[in-house]
Image (cartoon, helix red, strand yellow):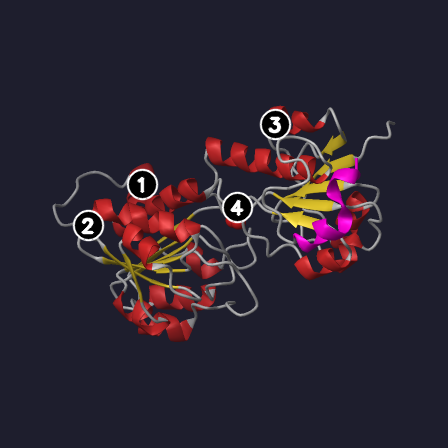
Amino acid sequence: MTDKPRVWVSRPTFPDIIARLDEHFEVLSEPVEIKFSAAGLAAKLAGQDAAIVGLKERVGAAEIAGAKRLRIVANLSVGYDNLDLDALTSAGIAASNTADVLNESVADYTWALLLGAARRVGEAERWVRAGGWKATEFTQWLGMDVRGRTLGILGMGRIGQAVARRAVGFGMEVIYHNRSSLPSSVERECNARYVDKTSLLRESDFLVLVLPLTAENRHAIGAYELAQMKPTAVLVNVARGGIVDDAALANALAGGRLAAAALDVFEGEPAVHPALLTLDNVVLSPHIASASHDARRAMTALAVDNVMAFFGHGPHAGRPPTILNPAVLAEASPATHS
Ligand code: GLV
């Protein structure tokens, strides 16, 4: 045992990046993926000075109640609906996310899903693997072109903007809805036009969801919203499960009220609504939009940087680069914690 501050890393990541902590911290990394119960997570956090956690760790008042030494929770994702930020802030515990380093990778993957759904890539692949390809009829595998169609984006943060910029190459019109419209310089750069939510639903040929999950936007896309979309439209969710009512979506897809969907995130994941699993017009993936080598390494490095900086080390000493509750820093004199 040393008197170095202790850092717990809740899941296996990249050992060479986590090793940057070794000089200043006693590091305990979980060697395998574990789904911790609330009590199990509380037991892990107790006695730690810092924690690097993933989305499946839900950190709230109960989990930190016994974590008397805990000073920072560094989330390994940009979305942080798994953290109770109010509870952390009240306890004087800093929280950080991995904003920005994954924007381009998530935008690339969004297009992979969008194009995969439009051109039926998953369905065709399943057919080939199942030995279905004896001959192909000329009109058998018809999909949808994207060129000239309207791309709608709900949630126009930096990932939404990166998705929009790519649409230029596909010759698409881009409309978006957001809590507020973007500065006109950003709209010009993204070639995107602000519309109200109803117009977004009605006019989009491809509707991409890139908004954070909050209490207000749970089921932002439910039966009512799906009914307003074109029956030829494609819905892409790379944001969070719970933003879409998956049961209502499965109904719309099965009933021909929506052409197709591509989903990287699900309500209650890793469980997937059973009706979605039976449908051919939906592309399913296991929450991997940020899972490129570069992005996942950069996310890990950023989480490490946040912890290091909080304790007064590294290039950002005293200024964790993506802190979510900076008020905690003012109270905590961060650089004095080592
Ligand atoms: C992934 O979903 C993230 O929020 O980074």
Query: Would you place residue 307 above or below residue 24 in this image?
Result: below
Q: Nearer the viewer, mark 1 or mark 4?
A: 4
Q: Amino acid at mark 4?
A: Ala
Per the rendering, the mark at residue 99 is 4
* Quarter location, residue 17: top right
**In terms of sequence position, does the residue under pointer 3 or pointer 4 come before the other?**
3
Some atom of ligand 1 lies within 8 Å of the CB belonging to the residue at label 4? no
Does residue 188 appear to the left or right of 216 in the view shown?
left
* Quarter location, residue 90: bottom right
Q: Can residue 150 be found in the magenta stretch?
A: no
Q: Amino acid at mark 1?
A: Glu
Per the rendering, the mark at residue 125 is 1
SS of the residue under disc 1: helix
Q: Amino acid at mark 3?
A: Ile
Question: Mark 1 near mark 3, Cβ–Cβ under 8 Å?
Answer: no
Mark 2, other Cα within 10 Å: few <14 / some 14–19 / many ≥20: few
Name which residue lies at 70% across and 40% down: 310
Distance between the Cα atoms at labels 3 and 4? 18 Å
Question: Mark 3 near mark 4, Cβ–Cβ under 8 Å?
Answer: no
Say if residue 117 shows up in the picture: no
